[in-house]
Image (cartoon, rainbow, N blue to C red):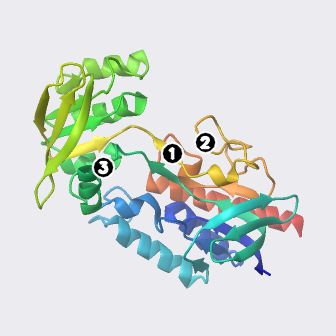
Amino acid sequence: MSNIKNVQCLIIGSGPAGYTAAIYAARADMKPLLYEGLQPGGQLTTTNEVENFPGYPDGVTGPEMMVQLKDQALRFETDVRAGFITKVEFGADIHKCWADDGTEIHAETVIISTGASAKYIGLESEQKYLKMGGGVSACAVCDGFFYRGQETVIVGAGDSACEEAHYLSKLCTKVTMLVRKSDFRASKIMAERVRKTPNIEILFNTETLEVMGDDVGVTGAKVINTITKEEKVIPCTGFFVAIGHQPNTAIFKDFIDLDETGYIKYAQPGTSKTNIPGVFVSGDAADKTYRQAITAAGTGCMAALDAERYLSAKH
């Protein structure tokens, strides 16, 4: 027989959204239980320097910030557990969730903070420098600042890739954009903006073979033209990947309304409510526009406040 735990509030996932929700829920005496998920601390744990989160005038590393947020949640007696939720059954009053440690949780409210995972090309060399924190990134807005006055490469063909390339062009001396096919997938206006930017060079029909570097970080990208088969090395210190994100929401699809790409839909704009009463969402699991630590934290606060109001009205 499984171990059943009854809670007022279950938070699924960590990161800025989950931990902020925990801080607010715990201070409201909801005694939250938080499962950290497959990547404790979320995407920020792969970010070396965070310089755009308010309150850190000298910047902070992503992992350090996550430790501090976790410590703050623990200070208010959040029950933080390693592990992840494997199955959910959302009902009318009680929401049942099962964890990988065998615990069956019966929660009055659930806050989903499972985030989204950036898609990468999948090269061994790309993953090496991503883990090293030495030049590979999936967020130009987060990390572009560190490459000002340098040359960068960005991979992608959609609106996000064009937006990020344009953003980098204001900071970097040169941005080389690698597009796998013969044209952009982006809207005409975004593609035109990139084409008209003097320090952006666009290479169509081009794929990355290897991210090159040394013990310090990235030094270049070895690419191939898929039509001519010509190979060359593009010097760069930053290698950005903008080929999309995958929201970590598959486990909820039988109960929660998702959009065509898997992001959770808000049932009521301006709130954190989903289509299931008592189930709320925060962070990148619902946000495909901003995807910043500060916006995730803000929605974590909203979700906890919405959950508290839901419980107050119910009891």
Give residue 8's quadrant in the image. bottom right
Q: Helix, strand or loop at disc 1?
A: strand
Whether residues under marks 2 and 1 lie with C-beta atoms below 8 angstroms apart, the answer is yes
Task: State the separation of the CA atoms marked 2 and 1.
Answer: 7 Å
Instruction: Provide the residue designation for mark 1.
Output: 246
Locate residue 264: give its quadrant.
top right
Res 262 label: 2
Give the mark nearer the N terminus: 2 vs 1: 1
Q: Which marked residue is nearer to the observer: mark 3 or mark 1?
A: 1
Q: Is residue 220 above or below residue 79?
A: above
The numbered mark, 3 or 1, whose residue comes first in the sequence reads 3
Q: Secondary structure at mark 2?
A: loop
Q: Position of residue 152 (x, y in %)?
A: 19, 40
How many C-alpha atoms fall within 10 Å of the one at disc 2: few (<14), some, or many (≥20)? Answer: some
* Residue type at tag 2: Gly
Question: What's the amino acid at mark 3?
Answer: Ser
Number of other residues with Cα within 10 Å of mark 3, as a class: few under 14, some 14 to 19, many 20 or more? many
**C-alpha span from label 3 to label 1:** 16 Å
Residue placed under numbered mark 3 in the picture: 137
Q: Is residue 85 above or below residue 203?
A: below
Q: CA distance from mark 2 to mark 3?
A: 23 Å
